[in-house]
Image: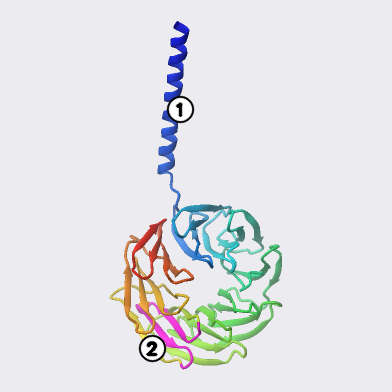
Amino acid sequence: MQIKKYIHSLLLLTFSTLTYLTQAQNEAKMVLPIGHTDWVRSAQYNASGSQIVTASDDKTARIWDASTGELLHTLQGHTSRVNSADYNASGSQILTTSDDETAKIWNAQTGELLHTLQGHNEWVCLARYNVDGSRLVTASEESTKIWHAVSGRLLHTFQGYTNRDVLRVFNSTGSQIVTASYDETAKIWDAKTGKLLHTLQGHTKDVSSAQYNASGSQIVTASDDSTAKIWDAETGELLYTLQGHTDEITSAQFNVTGSQILTTSDDETAKIWNAQTGELLHTLQVPYGEYWSAHYNSMGNQIVTVSDEMARIWDTETGELLETLKGHTNVITSAIFNSEGSKLVTTSFKTVKIWDAKTGKLLHTL
């Protein structure tokens, strides 16, 4: 009988201990952060809109389910902050860049690291896939490089490159790359050979942005000289100068059809222009705050602008403010629509938020 009582007591003690440990583990799981622990620099949807990838100063990128907000994978491997994260066209790969002087290619479904692209001697600020995802371009302060996306093999390092270039973008066919530079120029390159094709001269201060239209026939550049310029991508000829901003222009981009151009500026306005004539169509203004960035949705009928702690959705035909997205408690670093234009994602300090683009309703905080 004594032995039975002893065994019974021991079993109760063991069960109680296991129960306590299980509860403690569950409580620990509940308080452990699953989101980012530092500034979130960017967010991108995959083509289907089913996933979002975010890049952060906490040295990680994270993949999220766009419908539920569930964390799917944490991409760990960089040893310094992650500056950008982007999907390829099919959504099968993710490309990240970092201050650790590398870019990395990941499997977007499993989170597995596929390749580490080494060769830069400075922080890698940006990387982009070409349209079919076969090649990619990486950019640092000292060089621009083109890589094979499947093997991770280095194909070209640009010659005639200036270490003050700040942005590199493929055209829609992947045949050209345009770079924007702090030397007051933009340059057009042959993406297959790395040969310099044209130098776009005309700005009188740093060129902060350069983008192709959807067909690849035109380029728009933005500059600290308060102007944007439209160029012929084949000849390098200057077509129009967009004048109207009173301070540095921070970004410029075409809508999906190439009929409009959207510019943002430190003068507390964004402007919509006719891309064929250079005519100013609308000025979007808020009571305070500089516009850091803006993006069209895929249909081109709405724009999201980022200013301080709020994002705003505008109608591109009328210039009317449709929704103001409030909820972040710190500066918003990026905002972008999904492919359908039905949702958008915003990033800030330690937080990512998903919104309904039609109603402005907050759907998830990641």
Report whether 133 appears left or right of 319. Answer: right
Say if 338 sits above or below 204 in the image: above
**203 w.r.t. 334: above or below:** below
- Residue 277: x %, y % from top left: 46, 93
**C-alpha distance separating marks 1 and 2:** 69 Å
According to the picture, the residue beneath numbered tag 1 turns out to be 18
Q: Quadrant of the C terminus?
A: bottom left
Residue placed under numbered mark 2 in the picture: 281
Q: What residue type is labelled 1?
A: Leu
Question: Which residue is pictured at 65% across the width and 61% down the height?
Answer: 117
Instruction: Give the residue at x 34% y 77%.
Output: 268
| Magenta residue span | 257-277
In the rendered image, residue 276 lying in the magenta stretch gets the answer: yes
Which comes before the other along the chain, label 1 or label 2?
1
> Does dot 1 land on a helix, a strand or a loop?
helix
In magenta stretch: residue 60: no
- Near mark 2 (Cα within 10 A), the count class, few <14, some 14-19 or many ≥20, is some
**In the image, is residue 314 above or below residue 118?**
below
Q: x%, y% of residue 340?
A: 46, 71
Percent coordinates x, y for residue 324 in the rendering: 32, 70
Residue at the far top: name it.
1
